[in-house]
């Protein structure tokens, strides 16, 4: 009996412990990120090194633009576009929500600038412009994107637009995005290098790459970030180091910083497991050959091959036809077989011109005219780009008027703007403050500017307690996130002074947050926004606003 009672006590204790474990585990399960998906693939072997929800449907957001650039590269390879070709901007494209360049309807943008804006700024107006110019409409372009995805083996991906803005039917998976990240490198190894652009200059504006891992994590050479509310923070990354090559995908990050930290952790944990040997995985997309127009050599036309048992017929003097080759070298067009050669006595008779879509005999003079016109068209064809440009991507300086217009546009993340989160159209009341000279310690601020000028990574936490970031054309884009604005002043000095005073009066509420000024054109006047950036959540921004309001500062929160 005593033994039976002991067994019953242990059974009861086991049930209690099991229930306690479930209660402890339940909150962790509830707190799990439902948007998360990730994968790490060895690009040399095709082996999956890590996977979590890799085949579950997710929203690609601006990862969509990887496929948009893929199709641009196809057009460049086919010779239908060159880097100097220009896309015309429609009203529909110009109306896209940020992130955007602020293109105006009726203006044009070059292919080179379009690619630069897509891989760095992730400009939505540029993506729509590309789609409309290549396929006539964004819907037709999206259908081509989906067809291309199927050809690459991305069987769970469907595109409905070229930019990645919210559309419930535009879906993908982490595995499919890894496939695309590998395919674009295999198919276009030279053009792919453009994804390593840290800063692209467009009409005097510096467009900084949203991919913060470039230059910070050794071996990272691309490729693209993405964000909408429905997707969370996404990132496709390619890493080549010590003879190894992996492509990793993180989707659904809660913040850009957490996404980057998780990607860095995945690289550290799985890169060393990738193969250092030769490539064994089959190519997803083989490098294509550029089709080049080559005119046949008419000075020394080849004679027909000698047919067994017969003598070669005399040359007729008939003109050669044009030829296209895929190798870039001239390829002679075989002459007709001997039995088809026109006798010399009949050389003046009307000739049939092959390759012109008609079997109607033409007089000899018209034959010559057609050939002359064909060569004239061939000589007028634009050169076909053989590889990505070696020169850095730069453009002409922008005019003062255009700079003012650009300053008026807000740079926002890849998501539709909500009316309840936008800044008021009228400037906030400006407190009168005494302007004090700002002392710059030698070797600090100038060093930051110099690093930015050469495209070196600029740390986000450089002296946050003492320095105020002044937004200019040479300033890196602030990581998308929550910000608070306390004023819009008439001078930059007033904004800087107000930010420093506000920070000193609020104590820990703004600790670790970056003071930031930004010029904006309103009502024909330039004002300077005074903001603090770097809040992870809306509630953190609101909490800071409460502290600022207690210190008698106007304040509102905004996501940008």
Image (cartoon, helix red, strand yellow):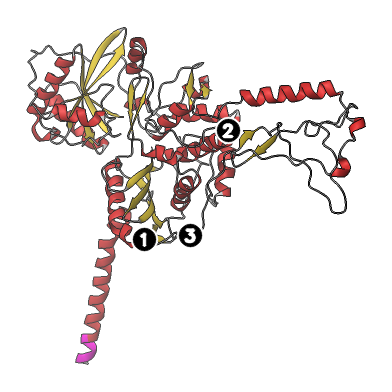
Name the N-terminal-most of marks 1 and 3: 1
The residue identified by callout 2 is 79
Q: Are marks 2 and 3 in contact (CB under 8 Å)?
A: no
Q: Which residues are magenta?
A: 2-6
Dot 3 alpha-carbon crowd within 10 angstroms: few under 14, some 14 to 19, many 20 or more: few
The N terminus lies in which quarter of the figure? Answer: bottom left
C-alpha separation, residue under disc 2 versus residue under disc 3? 30 Å
Q: Position of residue 182 (x, y in %)?
A: 45, 50
Image mark for residue 276: 1
On screen, residue 380 above or below 53: above
Q: Are marks 2 and 1 in contact (CB under 8 Å)?
A: no
SS class of the residue under badge 1?
loop
Q: Is residue 268 left or right of residue 74?
A: left
Query: Is 396 part of what is drawn in magenta?
Result: no
Q: Is residue 219 left or right of residue 160?
A: left
The residue identified by callout 3 is 281
Q: Quadrant of residue 558?
A: top left
Q: Residue furthest right?
A: 345
C-alpha separation, residue under disc 2 versus residue under disc 1? 36 Å
Magenta stretch, main secondary structure class: helix
The C terminus lies in which quarter of the figure? Answer: top left
Image mark for residue 119: none
Q: Nearer the viewer, residue 506 or 62?
A: 62
Name the N-terminal-most of marks 2 and 3: 2
Viewer-nearest of discs 2 and 3: 2
Q: Quadrant of residue 269?
A: bottom left
Q: Residue at x 24, y 23 (%)?
A: 471
SS class of the residue under badge 2?
loop
Q: Position of residue 188 (x, y in %)?
A: 49, 43
| Number of residue marks | 3
């Amino acid at each position: 009996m005593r033994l039976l009672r002991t067994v019953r006590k242990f059974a009861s204790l086991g049930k209690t412990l099991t229930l306690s474990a479930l209660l402890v585990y339940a909150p962790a399960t509830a707190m799990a990120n439902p948007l998360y998906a990730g994968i790490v693939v060895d690009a040399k072997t095709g082996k999956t090194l890590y996977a979590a929800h890799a085949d579950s449907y997710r929203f690609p957001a601006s990862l969509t633009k990887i496929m948009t650039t893929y199709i641009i590269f196809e057009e460049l390879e086919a010779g239908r576009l060159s880097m100097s070709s220009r896309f015309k901007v429609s009203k529909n494209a110009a109306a896209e929500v940020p992130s955007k360049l602020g293109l105006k309807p009726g203006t044009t943008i070059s292919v080179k600038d379009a690619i630069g804006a897509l891989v760095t700024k992730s400009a939505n107006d540029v993506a729509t412009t590309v789609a409309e110019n290549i396929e006539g409409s964004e819907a037709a372009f999206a259908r081509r994107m989906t067809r291309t995805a199927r050809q690459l083996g991305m069987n769970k991906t469907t595109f409905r637009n070229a930019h990645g803005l919210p559309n419930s039917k535009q879906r993908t998976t982490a595995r499919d995005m890894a496939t695309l990240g590998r395919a674009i490198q295999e198919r276009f190894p030279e053009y792919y290098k453009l994804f390593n652009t840290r800063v692209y200059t467009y009409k005097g504006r510096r467009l900084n790459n949203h991919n913060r891992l470039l230059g910070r994590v050794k071996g990272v050479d691309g490729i693209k970030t993405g964000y909408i509310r429905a997707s969370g923070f996404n990132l496709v990354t390619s890493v080549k180091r010590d003879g190894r090559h992996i492509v990793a995908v993180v989707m659904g990050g809660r913040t850009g910083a957490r996404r980057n930290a998780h990607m860095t952790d995945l690289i550290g944990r799985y890169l060393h497991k990738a193969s250092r040997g030769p490539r064994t995985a089959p190519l997803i997309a083989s490098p294509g050959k550029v089709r080049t127009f080559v005119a046949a050599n008419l000075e020394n036309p080849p004679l027909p091959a000698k047919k067994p048992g017969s003598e070669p017929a005399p040359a007729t003097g008939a003109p050669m036809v044009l030829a296209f080759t895929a190798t870039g070298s001239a390829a002679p067009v075989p002459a007709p077989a001997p039995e088809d050669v026109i006798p010399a006595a009949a050389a003046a008779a009307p000739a049939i011109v092959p390759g012109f879509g008609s079997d109607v005999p033409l007089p000899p003079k018209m034959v010559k005219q057609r050939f002359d016109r064909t060569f004239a068209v061939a000589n007028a064809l634009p050169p076909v780009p053989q590889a990505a440009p070696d020169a850095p991507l730069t453009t002409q300086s922008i005019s003062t008027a255009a700079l003012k217009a650009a300053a008026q546009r807000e740079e926002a993340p890849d998501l539709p703007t909500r009316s309840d989160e936008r800044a008021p159209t009228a400037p906030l009341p400006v407190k009168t403050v005494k302007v004090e000279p700002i002392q710059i310690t030698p070797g600090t601020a100038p060093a930051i500017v110099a690093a930015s000028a050469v495209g070196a990574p600029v740390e986000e936490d450089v002296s946050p307690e003492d320095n105020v970031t002044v937004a200019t054309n040479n300033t890196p884009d602030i990581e998308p996130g929550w910000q608070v604005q306390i004023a819009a002043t008439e001078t930059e000095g007033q904004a800087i002074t107000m930010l420093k005073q506000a920070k000193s009066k609020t104590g820990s509420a703004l600790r670790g947050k970056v003071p930031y000024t930004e010029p904006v054109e309103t009502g024909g006047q330039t004002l300077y926004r005074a903001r603090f950036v770097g809040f992870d959540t809306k509630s953190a921004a609101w909490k800071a606003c409460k502290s600022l309001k207690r210190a008698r500062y106007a304040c509102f929160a905004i996501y940008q």
